[in-house]
Image (tube, grey):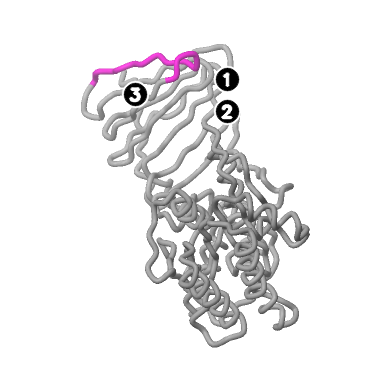
């Protein structure tokens, strides 16, 4: 559903601005008034006059000259306030500040000065404002070597470049860009309340710099180990998604190691420490694979191409159970423990089977014991 509320976003080409505008467009907000450093002042005034809601996300945190902190974090707010007065705009204002506003450094002082200007303006003119003090924001489209250590680590590690760590035990607090955008949109939709004009975004994640580097290095190694990160852990999920967004466009694809012989091939696809592993098995016509059983390990077979006969026999019984399956009708066949089992290609073409095992294969403890299904 199209939403035409005119929304002004300053810093629209920045990290948060790009993510916010992309999400708003996806939600159907069709009238976004995007402002950056190149926007003419006359157009900016027109935008402020038209806007029904304002996100002021423009700012600077790594200038070449410390004096630029005032220009980027104070003067831009002063200009916005003056323009609102001039246009008599009643649009609520959301401003991105920083937890550094409480710190005694040039960046923090400039952020606090910008906050004070807004709070004074709001108090005097009863203008609605929402000031968000962000901690370190991470996610896609953040500039490496500028916005955050996460962006720098992801960019460098994904390309095999060195990273620099001054204190691996230093702790940092992180918030994810999608959580930031979600909170900003909640504010737009009138679903949040401000206390003294200051708000925070949750959840926050705390991690040491050393552990952060180790985790991201693990993401890079996963292409070799095939071990996926725990997607149930929300921080791991968000961090891995961020890492992938920095992979070189020429490196999206990578090869898998396939074990091949005259019978066909077996290739591990993915492994997880929590949910086992997934592999693809290819068998030539007439070939039988398996003829073993497990005590605890269990599996699921899905034939995606070809025709197969899957046979079972309980290890202490003589009864044979058979299932005919094919790629024309996808179905899961459970492989319970305590049953010798085999899969036979009964077709004329290669048999392709996706196999899930409840644990990663451990050659020192394979829980796999040879036994023929056919007990004749």
Q: CA distance from mark 3 to mark 1?
A: 22 Å
For residue 327: magenta?
yes
Q: Earlier in the sequence, mark 2 or mark 3?
A: 2
Label 2 element class: strand
In the rendered structure, the answer to whether residue 364 lies left or right of residue 32 reads left
Please report the residue visible at 49 percent of the width from the left and 63 percent of the height from the top: 127
Q: CA distance from mark 1 to mark 2?
A: 8 Å
Residue beneath label 3, please?
373
Q: Which residues are magenta?
A: 318-330
Numbered tag placed on residue 232 in the rendering: none
Please report the residue visible at 71 percent of the width from the left and 83 percent of the height from the top: 67
Frontmost of labels 3 and 1 is 1
Q: Quadrant of residue 283?
A: top right
Residue beneath label 2, please?
264
Residue 180 is situated, as x and y percent measured from the top left of the image, at: 49, 57
Residue 215 is situated, as x and y percent measured from the top left of the image, at: 51, 63
Specify the quadrant that holds the C terminus.
top left
Q: Earlier in the sequence, mark 3 or mark 1?
A: 1
Say whether marks 2 and 3 touch (CB < 8 Å): no
Q: Earlier in the sequence, mark 1 or mark 2?
A: 2
Residue beneath label 1, please?
350
For residue 315: magenta?
no
Residue 16 is situated, as x and y percent measured from the top left of the image, at: 59, 58
* Above/below status of 161 relative to 271: below
Say whether marks 1 and 2 touch (CB < 8 Å): yes
Frontmost of labels 2 and 3 is 2
Residue 333 versus residue 11: which sits nearer the camera? 11
* Above/below status of 238 relative to 289: below
* Above/below status of 333 relative to 88: above
């Amino acid at each position: 559903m199209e939403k035409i509320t005119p929304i002004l976003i300053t810093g629209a080409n920045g990290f948060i601005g790009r993510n916010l505008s992309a999400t708003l467009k996806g939600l159907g907000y069709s009238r976004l008034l995007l402002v950056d450093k190149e926007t003419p002042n006359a157009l900016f005034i027109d935008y402020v006059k038209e806007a029904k809601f304002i996100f002021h996300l423009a700012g600077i945190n790594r200038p070449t000259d410390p004096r630029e902190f005032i220009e980027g974090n104070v003067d831009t707010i002063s200009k916005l306030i003056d323009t609102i007065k001039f246009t008599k705009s009643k649009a609520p204002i959301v401003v991105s500040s920083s937890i550094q506003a409480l710190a005694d450094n040039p960046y923090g002082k400039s952020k606090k000065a910008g906050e004070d200007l807004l709070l004074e303006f709001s108090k005097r003119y009863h203008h609605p404002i929402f000031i968000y003090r962000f901690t370190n924001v991470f996610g896609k489209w953040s500039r490496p070597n500028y916005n955050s250590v996460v962006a720098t680590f992801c960019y460098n590690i994904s390309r095999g470049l060195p990273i620099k760590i001054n204190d691996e035990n230093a702790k940092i607090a992180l918030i994810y860009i999608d959580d930031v955008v979600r909170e900003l949109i909640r504010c737009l939709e009138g679903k949040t309340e401000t206390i003294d004009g200051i708000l925070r975004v949750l959840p926050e994640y705390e991690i040491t710099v050393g552990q952060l580097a180790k985790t991201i290095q693990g993401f890079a190694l996963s292409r070799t180990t095939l071990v996926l990160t725990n997607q149930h852990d929300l921080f791991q999920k968000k961090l891995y998604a961020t890492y992938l967004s920095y992979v070189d466009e020429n490196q999206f694809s990578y090869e898998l190691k396939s074990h091949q012989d005259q019978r066909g091939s077996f290739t591990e696809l993915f492994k997880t420490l929590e949910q086992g592993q997934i592999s693809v098995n290819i068998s030539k016509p007439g070939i039988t694979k398996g003829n073993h059983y497990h005590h605890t390990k269990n599996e699921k077979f899905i034939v995606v191409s070809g025709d197969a006969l899957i046979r079972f026999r309980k290890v202490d019984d003589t009864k044979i159970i058979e299932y005919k399956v094919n790629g024309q009708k996808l179905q899961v066949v459970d492989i319970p423990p305590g049953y010798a089992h085999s899969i036979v290609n009964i077709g004329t073409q290669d048999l392709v089977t996706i196999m899930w095992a409840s644990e990663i294969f451990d050659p020192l403890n394979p829980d796999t014991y040879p036994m023929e299904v056919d007990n004749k």
